[in-house]
Image (cartoon, rainbow, N blue to C red):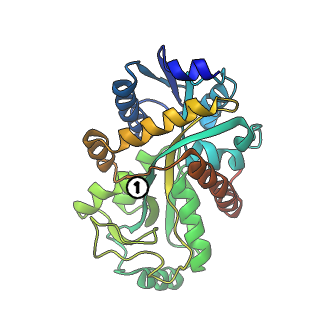
Amino acid sequence: VPAAAQTYPSRPIRMIVPYPPAGPIDIMARLLGQQLSLRFGQQVVIENRPGAGSMLGTKAAATAEPDGYTLLFGSSGSLAVAPALYSNFDLDILKAFVPVGAVALLPHVLVISPSVPAKTVAEFIAYAKANPGKLNYGASIGTPPHLLSTLFKTKAGIDVVYVPYKGSAASVTDLLAGETQFTIDGLTGLYPLIQDGKVRPLAVARAERWPELPDVPTLVESGFADFTVDAWTGVVAPAGTPAEIVRRLNRSINDSLGSAEAKAGLARFSAIAQTGSPQEFAAWVASELPKWAAIVKLSGARID
């Protein structure tokens, strides 16, 4: 093992993405893969393995040879939400993988349709309470917009209706048309709509304000003391991957995230680069699992 670690990597590395090509997570994985390829002198090949709500790709990575040549570009969706959402998810994430390194945080923002006469979170809650059962929010079941909007509904004590969608494109289209009235979704997709005035931002779901939206308060400032939830991405490897290989990967990921190319790429997604040790990422993942499981339970979502 020590000899293998010294010469690592001596051949291409496969990084599994458990989602289809061209989405934000896939593009982030490709951005990181390009940077790692430059540093290693070996190709990092992105392999999309979508299906079963990310379970297919996640299981493929977990059962791969733990030699550092198969990695998983994981996320809060595949590593924290899926285990709580799918009844047949039979992996213990903390035992199946060794965390390698964090990549990015993906902030979320509460927005409303301009058809709703509210300028603040307090005004929106008052409007919802004055119109019980008349406001809708839409999202695919088990996605952050579904889970976080349901969490907000519960914390705010408002009577609003969840409308299930098969994909995010349709739900955003209906939000723009005023068919649904609010959502909490990622800044990745909503920031351009905010800039164009097509949706109205009321609060970001972070501890601090978003620099590009300095006039938009946080949900904490708006009276929700513990409403700080980011989606995230990071790299994990099959359990048993040698520690020296994990450390080398971690150093290269951190170096990659410091590059101008990576910073510019992540900025396009309103994402925040996250660097740190494997131990820090392991502690983060361990803390996020029960957090997202509680949100899934609150939503009542369950997929067999």
Q: Position of residue 59 (x, y in %)?
A: 67, 29
* Relative horizontal placement of residue 102, taking residue 264 as reference (left or right): right
Image quarter (top left, top right, bottom left or bottom right) of the C terminus: top right
Amino acid at dot 1? Asp
Task: Give whichever of 56, 238 is nearer the camera.
Answer: 238
Q: Quadrant of the N terminus?
A: top right
Total number of numbered labels? 1
Which residue is drawn at the image coordinates 49% and 59% (left, top)? 230
Q: Residue at the location (35% across, 56% down)?
A: 190
In front of the other: 221 or 51: 221
Tell whether 35 sits left or right of 152.
Answer: left
Q: Is residue 195 above or below residue 281?
A: below
Counting from the top left corner in percent of width and height, residue 135 is at 49, 70
Q: Position of residue 148 (x, y in %)?
A: 55, 62
Residue 158 shows in the view: no
Return the residue at label 1: 174
Graded by Cα atoms within 10 Å as few (under 14), some (14 to 19) or many (20 or more), the crowding at tag 1 reads some
- Toward which corner of the image does residue 54 lie, by quadrant? top right
Q: Quadrant of residue 61?
A: top right
- Residue 251 in sight from this viewpoint: yes
Depth order, front residue of 178/291? 291
Toward which corner of the image does residue 245 lie, by quadrant?
top right
